[in-house]
Amino acid sequence: MKDDKPTSFDIAFRAGVSQSTVSRALRNSPLVNLETRLKVQQIARELNYKVDKNASSLRSQQTKTIALLLCEDHGTGNSLINPFFLSMLGSITRATASRGFDLLISFQQFSEDWHADYEDANRADGIIFLGYGDYETFVKKLTYLTEVGAHFITWGPVLEGQPGVSIGCDNFNSAYSAAQHLLSLGRKNIAFLGDVSEHSPEFSDRYRGFCKALQEAGIEVNPKLQVAAETSEEEGYKATLSLLQRRLPFDAIFGASDLIAIGAMKALEEAGMHIPKDVAVMGFDDIPMASYTYPPLSTVQQDTLLAGELLVENLLLLVDGERPESMLLPAKLIVRGSCGANPVKK
Amino acid sequence: MKDDKPTSFDIAFRAGVSQSTVSRALRNSPLVNLETRLKVQQIARELNYKVDKNASSLRSQQTKTIALLLCEDHGTGNSLINPFFLSMLGSITRATASRGFDLLISFQQFSEDWHADYEDANRADGIIFLGYGDYETFVKKLTYLTEVGAHFITWGPVLEGQPGVSIGCDNFNSAYSAAQHLLSLGRKNIAFLGDVSEHSPEFSDRYRGFCKALQEAGIEVNPKLQVAAETSEEEGYKATLSLLQRRLPFDAIFGASDLIAIGAMKALEEAGMHIPKDVAVMGFDDIPMASYTYPPLSTVQQDTLLAGELLVENLLLLVDGERPESMLLPAKLIVRGSCGANPVKK
DNA sequence: TCCCTTATTGCATAAATATGCAAAACAACA
DNA sequence: TGTTGTTTTGCATATTTATGCAATAAGGGA
């Protein structure tokens, strides 16, 4: 159908220079005379020439590619992807592209040896991890990755002594503010839905911030008002049912994530309770659907745009041999209808 | 920190065989003795050896990689990604991984020369296009891609004479059924929100199916009840406002997409109209948030899982030199609360 | 024992680029 | 004109793997 793809030798021949000069000219090296450079580039354009990525990567030993590994929490196989991660995905894609890098993505389970598959195989210069499943397993993995000298960055918890560089949300302070907000609206018996074991350090941080707000308001934290739940609507739904069975009075629910909060809203609605009159609801993440629930979900918004930028930027620093610091990003309280601060139109 | 990455020569040396044998053994070629094969594989495992992807691709001229190009409709830059495409993304990722292929993704605008960037540069064996922006531009692009012999498949409209292989939803029949459903519930003045120009062939198909249902029910199609809108909540919102201004009676809205329908619901609510009592609403796509609106949105569900599988499968056929047929996938009506068929709990 | 198959292995090379080093071209200056 | 310095170019090679072809080993029949 069409002739073979032109190589740098073809360009060289056409331009009457050597292949080396072509290679340099196309990368705009100041080593080659401006005139020659333009001529070569012109010919390359005419022939529709593109540098062969494989040859280039092989020779230069850098791929200009980043791998994004999305670890589904406790991998349920074909379940929905956490919408929050999808927002991150969007911003990471843009940040990557704007730096001239390609993005390789994978949704496999964390059990695989990703470092080997991507970095050792010379497929990617570095890896971004999104999500982590069980924290202990995750840390083991990070330790291993650090030992073998992998270049990676993670989004998620930023704990003392955690190997590698991480960027995450300031869960503690954000949850603290959100809880304060509920308290300021007169809610006194606030339930917390989310796993707070060592397996979920982010949720634990949110819970600690939540508790601090209660304590400062002179309210004793009732552990019976905390119900474990992972990030999914079903878990939030079930946790709420279990909460209802405890027959303890509560006038607000703080979901450790929006999905949990949304599941809770479904359960409350089915139980005939009115949101926010009977029970105020607060989420965390601000996933797109948060503003479409009824009533719209008040929540804590993470700046995914900034997060994506920082992840990519710092990963590339890491690849360049620098040693960026882990950091926590502030989040913003978004007040909608579910917490009772705004009038709910019917 | 650690010694250099082992190459196939290192394995060969350790195993006392030649590099060729290592290469064959690792790919499980029957040309090499089973015993030798196992020994080589064992040593490779011990040394943590991974085949260099670039060298391998360079030599074999196939990348085992697929590029997924997501074209945002009329590229609004930093806007949200269409949630429907994100569902597709999930299934495409899985389908790709299960075949041992990598997935390269990009969200750039359609104006770039993607074929050149990906296939010519030997980065990917084939391309999947998701979304297309303006249809005319899209077709020009497809024509070009066909001419240069690119391997690609598109998700979207499947029109007569359209270059290349496409997989899409049976928009006509699905919209026909959905409209029939609204009619069966006694709605007579149904508005249609969505661009039905030649720029949006999918919406046009949906509109044609919609019209057919009306006509069969003996209802004349009123063009004033059709308002243009692209896929976004804002457009749906604005289209509804514009519809309201026309002061025509209507008792149902059929949104050409869920986002449009959701925007419409917001506008109706603000106008003090009750859904579904005053106005029934029907969407199209079944994006995740459709079941979380109030009332939950009735819609047409596209089988994204199947779609992803088929896209990948047929693209690989194409890469192998076969010539798969374009096809339309049936969709399923999902009846929730917004169309008035189910009782809406308050 | 010799010859012919069949099963295994190794040799040599090609895939396309990037880059260290040497060479050439050129100007400038004495 | 010779020398020195700068700019520009080309040579040669390295990157790592896959594979056509030749070579060797092993096995079997006469």
Image: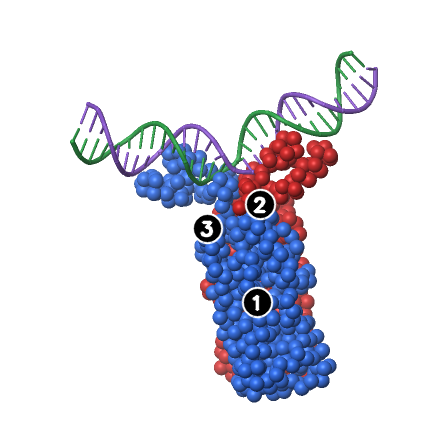
Chain colours: A blue, B red, C green, D purple
Does B226 sit left or right of A250 as displayed?
A: left
At 59% from the left and 34% from the top, the residue drawn is B9
As displayed, is residue B79 above or below residue A176? above
Pointer 3 chain: A
- The secondary element bearing badge 3 is classed as loop
At 65% from the left and 42% from the top, the residue drawn is B46
Counting the numbered discs, the total is 3
**Labelled disc at residue A84:** 1
Q: Position of residue B280 (x, y in %)?
A: 62, 79
Q: Report the amino acid beneath label 3.
A: Asp
Q: Report the amino acid beneath label 1.
A: Phe
Q: Is residue A110 visible?
A: yes
**From the viewer's perspective, is the residue at label 3 or at label 2 nearer?**
3
Cα separation, mark 1 vs mark 3, equals 29 Å
According to the picture, the residue beneath numbered tag 2 turns out to be: A121
**From the viewer's perspective, is the residue at label 1 or at label 2 nearer?**
2
- The secondary element bearing badge 1 is classed as helix
